[in-house]
Amino acid sequence: MAFDEVSGLLEQYEQLARERGSIAVEYLRPGLSLGQIDDVEQRHGFTLSEDVKAIWSWHNGIGPRPSPETPRRIGAAWDFMDLDRSIDHANSSLLNRNSGDADRYVFSRWVTFAASSVSAVIETSNTRIPDSPVLVDDVTQSVLNYPIVTVAEKLRWFIWAIENEAWHVDDKGAWQSNFDLFPKNAFKDVI
């Protein structure tokens, strides 16, 4: 169920991004087959949730761009890496957190959904739950200090942001945010 729902939301998102003139979506890599995802799981030593599999079977991150000036984000808050890099990025973050004194997540398995200085990560350690939670990974704070949504909810927020012009594409084809159009009292890092 989560695989199909997330796949449908991703297709809707991509269509909206293309209609709005996003340049970065033109450089999305082809998605991974389920066999290729199995290989990634074996290399990294853990099973991925169905919604994670849906994301990277849709596209495997953004590929090479013609120049460094070419927009790289496929959404205003979505720097989308390939699956191996997403796992490595999240693992590095977890290692840093777990070597500290507080906010340890030693049994967690994260995959970076959207990379930045404050990334969104998917908690995929419990593959039996139908909808994986998306956490805000701010190294200075506990993930519990931020709203927690599911992968499908996160994608619905992204779609809402485009449809309501809280995210828009500028004249260079890059995504921008208009925080004045965000829902009042909404936490900006959720979108």
Image (cartoon, grey):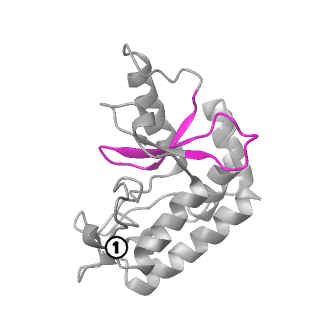
Q: Is residue 131 left or right of residue 153?
A: right
User: Which quadrant is the C terminus positioned in?
Assistant: bottom left
* Position above or below: 3 against 52: below
Q: Nearer the viewer, residue 144 or 48?
A: 144
Query: In the visual, does 59 lie left or right of 170?
Result: right
Looking at the rendered structure, the number of numbered marks drawn on it comes to 1
Q: Is residue 131 magenta?
A: yes
Q: Residue at x 38, y 57 (%)?
A: 79
In this view, the residue farthest toward the top is 101
**Residue furthest toward the bottom?**
19
The answer to whether residue 29 is visible is no
Q: Is residue 38 visible in the rendered structure shown here?
A: yes
Looking at the rendering, the stretch of residues picked out in magenta corresponds to 108-133
Residue at 33%, 44% (x, y): give it.
118
Point 34% across, 31% down: residue: 141
Residue 97 lies, with reference to residue 42, above or below; the image says: above
Residue drawn at 44 percent across, 61 percent down:
62
Q: Position of residue 99 (x, y in %)?
A: 40, 15
Q: Residues within 10 Å of mark 1 (few under 14, many from 20)?
A: many
- Establish if 55 lies above or below 84: below
Q: Quadrant of the N terminus?
A: bottom right
Q: Nearer the viewer, residue 102 or 57?
A: 102
Residue 166, located in which quarter of the rendered image? bottom left
Q: Is residue 63 magenta?
A: no
Residue identifier under label 1: 166
For badge 1, the amino acid type reads Ala
* Relative side of 121 to 72, left or right: right
Badge 1 element: loop
Choose between 186 and 3: the one closer to the eye.
Answer: 186
From the top left corner, tell me how far across and down residue 171 is, in percent: 23, 83
Q: Tell me: residue 141, above or below residue 158.
A: above
Q: Position of residue 89 (x, y in %)?
A: 43, 38
